[in-house]
Image (cartoon, grey):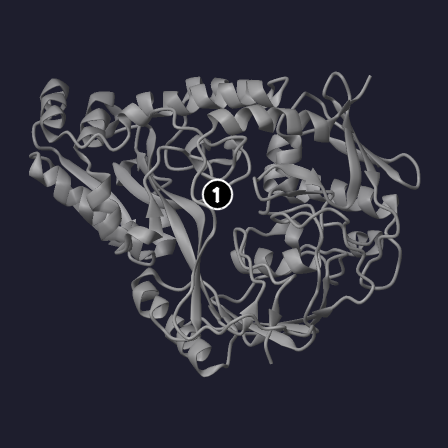
Amino acid sequence: MNKKVTLWFTAAMLALVLVACGGNDNETTENDGGEGDVTVEPGGEIRIAIPAQPPTLDAQVTVSTASLNIGRHIYETLVALNEDYEPVPMLAESVDMSEDGLTYTFVMREGLTFHNGEPVTTDDVEASMNRWLVSSSRAKLLLEGAEFEATDDQTVVLTLQERAADVLDIMAGQSEFPAIMPKDVVEGADASGVTEYIGTGPFKFEEWAQDQYIHLSKFDDYVASEEERSGLSGKKEALVDDIYFEIVTDPFTRVSGLQTGSYDIADEIPFDNFEQVSQMNDIETHLYLNRTLTWFYNINEGPMADQKMREAVNSAINLDDLLLFAYADEELYETHPGYMNLNQVNWSNTAGEENYNVNDPERAKELLEEAGYNGEEITIITTRDYDYMYKAALSVQDQLTEIGMNVNVENYDLATFLELKTVPSEWDMLAAGTGYVTIPAQLLALNPGFAGTDDPVAQEMLKEVRTAETPEDAYEKWEELQGYLYDFLSTTVMGHQNDIIATSNRVKGFEPFQAPILWGTTVEQ
C-alpha cells in the first residue's frame, strides 16, 4: 500500500512547527520617496544588476549562484521548495511513496510545454532525471544506485537502492538542481554541459552577450500551477516581457546604476553599503537569510586536535561582539545555534544552545590550563576576498589574545585559502561562509572532505538521519546530531547572515526567496 507523500509531509510539519525554532522571515525595508498604491500594467522589462558572469546556464551541473539565480526562471523541477522549505509537487501533480520507502511514483501535470513548443513527455523527464543522478555531485553521492523510469505517458517512477528519508529534499535543492529539459537536449550535452537552454519556466532564454547581459523573455505558452504561490512552488506569472540580467562586477556601479535608473534591481549589495543604500530615496532594501558563518577547527592534528583546546576557544568567544564587527549592522545577522536555515521548519532547532555563545573567558582560561597550553602559536587562515570572514578571524584573534593565547592570522587570496584548508598542517582554525543547504547531509560541517571535519560518530548519526522512517524521526535524529556537534566541537555556527538586494520603488510584487525571484514582479514604466 502506498503512502501519499504530500500528506505524510503535511502531518509531520504540523507537529514540527510546534517544536522547531524558526527564524526571521524575509524582510523588506521601505525608504522615503514611496508613493501610494499604484496600478502597474503587465509588460515592459526588468533590468537587474548581478555581480558575476555565470559559467553556464546548465542548472544540473553548476553550483554557481549567478547561474542558478537565472536558471530558476528558465527551468522547473518535479518538486520545489515552498516558503517553509518543504518539498512539494511542482511539475509533478502528485508523489506517492511505497511502504518500504524504496519507490517514488511521480504523476505529471497535464499540458506542460517546453520553450521550443514541444510537449513535455515522461521520456523527457526520465532522461533529465537520470542525467541529474550522474551529473550532480550531491545526487551522485546521496542517491547512489537510484534510477528513474517512465512507466506510461503520465508517470515516472524513482527506484532507490536503500531508503532515504530526504530524497524529495535533495530533489528540491537549488544547487545543481534537477531541471527538466527535452530529451534531445539532454542527449546532445557535451563535456561542458547542454548546448541549448530550454525548460518549462515562465521565462525563456533569448541571448547571452558575454560579460554584458543575459536576456530572457516571457514564455507565452507557460502552464502555471494552480496552487498558491509559495517560495519556489505554486503559481508563477511572467508579468514583464523581458528580463535583462546585467553583469556588473563593481558594487559601486550596481548601486549608482540603481540610483540613475539604469537598473531596476541590484543584487548582492555589500554589507558596508547597507546603511547608505537603505537611506536612499526611492530605493527599497530587501534582506533574506542566506548562509551561516561557521567556525572550523582542525581536529586532525595540531593544538585543536585536543578537545579541551576547542572547548577553551568556544568558551572565550563573544559572538555578539564578533558578529557586529563582521557585519557592522545588527540587521544583517541573527545569533542562533542552528546549522540549517532558520526558516526551514522541518530541520531548524536549538540543540546545543548551552554551548553556543558561551562568552566565559574565565572558564576558557581554566580549560587552557587543563589542556596544558604553553603559548604555542595558533594559526587562523582567512581571506580578505570575503571581508566578513576576515573580520571574524580578527575578532577571534583579539578575544583569544585577551585570555593569553598566541594567535596568528594569515590572510590569503581566495584560491590559496581554499587550497590550504585541505592541508591540515597549514592551519588550526578558520571561518567560512557556508550557504544554506536543503538537508543536513549537504552541510560542509559534516563533509569529510572539507576542512578536517571527519568524525565517525557524526557520520554514523548522519546515516540514522537519512534512513529514518518518518520526518518526525529524521528531525529527532538531526536534533541529536546537532547537539553532538556542539559537544564535540569540530565546528560551531557563529551566526546567520542576511544578504541584501536593493530595488527601485518602481518595482512591484518583488519577493526574494534565497535569491531574486522575478516572476510576479512588474516595473512601473
Q: Nearer the viewer, residue 502 or 121?
A: 502
Determine whether 394 is above or below 33 in the image: above
- Crowding at dot 1, Cα within 10 Å, few <14 / some 14-19 / many 20+, comes out as many
Q: How many marks?
A: 1
For disc 1, the marked residue is: 436
Camera-nearest residue between 203 and 10:
10
- Residue 300 picture quarter: top left
- Taking depth in this image into account, of 486 and 442 the one nearest to the observer is 486
Q: Relative to 387, is 437 above or below?
A: above
Residue at 15% across / 29% down in the picture? 360
Three-letter amino acid code of the residue under disc 1: Tyr
Task: Where is residue 287? Give x, y as percent.
Answer: 43, 55
In the rendered view, does 496 fall on the left or right side of 305?
right
> Quick one: which residue is furthest to the front in this view?
36
Q: In x, y percent, where is residue 104?
A: 77, 29
Residue 125, placed above or below residue 51? above
What is the x, y in percent for residue 24?
A: 43, 44
Residue 50, given in percent of the width and then of the height, sits at 50, 67
| Residue 462 visible, this angle | no
Res. 172 in view: yes
Considering the image in quadrants, where does the N terminus appear? top right
289 to the left or right of 511: left
SS of the residue at dot 1? loop
Q: Is residue 130 found left or right of 321 in the rendered image?
A: right
Choose top left, top right, bottom left or bottom right for residue 294.
top left
Give 31 or 432, whichever is nearer the viewer: 31
Quarter of the image with the C terminus is: bottom right
- Give me the residue at 65% from left, 62% from top: 520
